[in-house]
Image (cartoon, rainbow, N blue to C red):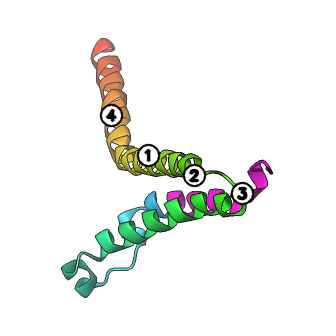
Amino acid sequence: MKALRFKQFLPAIAYLAFTFYLFTLPGQDLPEIHWVEKINFDKIVHLGLFTVLVFIFSYPFKKFDYTNAKRSKWFIYITLLSISYGIAIEFIDIAADIIGSFIGYAIVKWWFKNK
């Protein structure tokens, strides 16, 4: 049985980097299309991006003679990692808010100390 190699996942890793870039774009950098908001296009885009993410990370397993049980286990791992990635992306804004709050706290504490 051949072993999986890192290079077989390079397209998936490139796609992951591309989605990370897209998810971290400021909202004002995206084109404003009013009809898109009415059909919740954002949700459809996320659905598609994460579907492709799981598929593209799972694709290298097609070329290997793993048992169905072993393949299924890997697909579950990949799916759980994809879910974790989705949750982490949502926390980027929360992390920025928390860091901003601590910076504000440090500035206020310094400012009142020097008064």
Q: CA distance from mark 3 to mark 1?
A: 21 Å
Q: Nearer the viewer, mark 3 or mark 4?
A: 3
42, above or below 9, in the image: below
Say which residue appears at 30% left-offset and 18% top-offset: 109
Prevalent SS, magenta region: helix
Query: 12 and 18: which one is in front?
Result: 12
Residue 49 percent across, percent down from the top left: 45, 67
Which residue is identified by label 2?
71
Disc 3 to disc 1: CB gap under 8 Å:
no
Counting residues from the start of the chain, the first of labels 1 and 2 encountered is: 2
Q: CA distance from mark 4 to mark 1?
A: 26 Å
Q: Residues within 10 Å of mark 4 (few under 14, many from 20)?
A: few
Q: Amino acid at mark 4?
A: Ile
The numbered mark at residue 98 is 4
Counting residues from the start of the chain, the first of labels 3 and 4 encountered is: 3
Instruction: Indicate left or right for 20 with 9 as reference.
Output: left
Counting residues from the start of the chain, the first of labels 3 and 1 encountered is: 3
> For the view shown, which residue lies furthest in the top direction?
113
Query: 99 and 115: which one is in front?
Result: 99
Secondary structure of residue under mark 1? helix
Q: Amino acid at mark 3?
A: Phe
The numbered mark at residue 64 is 3
Secondary structure of residue under mark 2? helix
The numbered mark at residue 80 is 1
